[in-house]
Amino acid sequence: MPQAFVTHENESSIDEIQLEPLQVMESVTMSRQQSAAAPQFTLRAVAVGLILGILLTFSNIFLGLQTGWVMLGCGISAFAGFAIFKSASNMLAFPFSPAENVLVQTVASSVGAMTIGR
């Protein structure tokens, strides 16, 4: 256990006190239980993924016709999905989970990659 030394203003000696261990494991366990209880496949995550995917599709069409390059947009869709749900967090019936963010990213990048085709 970590040790800390504290001096008091009215005493000239240093008192050794023992700090309580951090409750890190309990908080990690609680957050895992909360995320396990949250639904993973939701209609709201699919809808946001579709909207972001449509935007990625249009940007891929434009970028592909102009330069010949297209992007999957995995990172863009993950950040945008998180930003959308974080900004609307006070209006949600249940909190946004990391599994939903993965679903948003997967749907958006799948829809956005449809422009690559054969």
Image (cartoon, grey):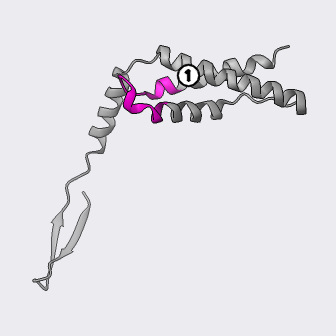
94 vs 106, nearest the viewer = 94
Question: Residue 42: image x %, image y %?
Answer: 46, 15
Question: Residue 68: image x %, image y %?
Answer: 89, 30
| In the depicted structure, whether residue 47 falls above or below residue 67 | above
Q: Kindly state the secondary structure of the residue where label 1 is placed.
A: helix
- Residue under the image location 63 percent in, 25 percent down: 52
Q: Residue furthest bottom?
A: 12
Question: Residue 30: image x %, image y %?
Answer: 29, 33
Q: Quadrant of the N terminus?
A: bottom left
118 vs 26, nearest the viewer = 118
Reading the image, the residue beneath label 1 is 48
Tell me: 43 left or right of 31: right
Question: Residue 53: image x %, image y %?
Answer: 66, 22
- Residue under the image location 81 percent in, 29 percent down: 70
62 vs 64, nearest the viewer = 62
Instruction: Report which quarter residue 35 is drawn in.
Output: top left
- Residue under the image location 52 percent in, 32 percent down: 84
Instruction: Report which quarter residue 64 is drawn in.
Output: top right
Tell me: 13 left or right of 82: left
Q: How many marks?
A: 1
Tell me which segment is drawn in magenta: 85-101
76 vs 51, nearest the viewer = 51
Tell me: 21 left or right of 80: left
